[in-house]
Amino acid sequence: MGRAPKICSFVIATALAVPLLAQDLGVAINLPIPELTERQMKEYHVIELAGAMPAEGDLLVDGKLPLPVIDFVSRLGMIHQRLSLFENGLVALELSGAGGTIRKRVIIPPDAVTAYRNYFVAADLAAFEPYAPGNPGHDQVILRISAADGTHVERRFPATAMLPALVERQRHVLQELLRALAEDREVTNPIAGYKGKIGDVLLGDDQKSYRVLRLVAGGEFLELLCTTEPVRRFVSRKDLHLYFIGVRPGS
């Protein structure tokens, strides 16, 4: 068994201390936790993304598509989650069924890729034999781990199944990574690093669209006009990621 990545050590300790109900499968459950523990969990998310950057371009490796290292798919009822980690550090995720769909691509640092590869060992997964594959329509997890020789091990099991401790920890670590990337707004938000262009349309976290009318102070501030209501907003460019989740180029 590989050593757990340093960036995930707090999550694994938490997993051992708190019963894993359905909260990691996309179901919103409030668990009363001490304030200090809550602050530590938020700190974990920041550490996880340290050095990460938005993925841009085709990200080919020697002209070819990068090889997948880990592929994780979970479906429980209407909740669908998928996370794929590739050899070049690309992480692609998709979440749907909870009021909308989130898709993101981000590059994580090489040391984080190495840590995950050392922890997710194909031979460890091969030792696990599920009692049932689960129902692919509403209750199934697919976990696929690639080995150094290019082969891979895949296991399918019910999302609601009780799992051996190692496999449960692996699933929990991947769901925490998925959650951290999904909740992050500064690194993986498509608006991060946006320079501002007159005519572009920004999608707010209130699900309203705002057109860029004017750039003020050399582009440090943007004047925005809601496309459906007579509302104007002035927002600092460095704070855009706090209020907006996407941008559409102007026509």
Image (cartoon, rainbow, N blue to C red):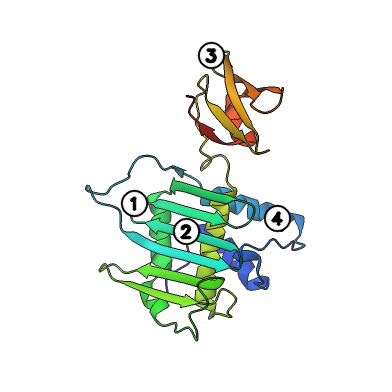
Is 47 above or below relative to 161? above
Position of 61 compared to 216: left or right?
left
Nearest to viewer (mark 2 / mark 4)? 2
Residue at mark 3: 218
Residue at mark 2: 83
> Which residue appears at 41% of the width and 83% of the height?
127
Cα–Cα span, label 2 and label 1: 15 Å
Quick one: label 3 or label 1, which is nearer the N terminus? 1
Quick one: label 3 or label 2, which is nearer the N terminus? 2
Residue at mark 1: 88
Quick one: label 2 or label 1, which is nearer the N terminus? 2
User: Callout 1: 10 Å neighbours few (<14), some, many (20+)?
Assistant: some
Q: Position of residue 137 (x, y in %)?
A: 53, 71
The kind of residue on which mark 1 rests is Asn
Cα–Cα span, label 2 and label 4: 24 Å
Q: Secondary structure at mark 2?
A: strand
Q: Secondary structure at mark 1?
A: loop
> Which residue appears at 28% of the width and 47% of the height?
60
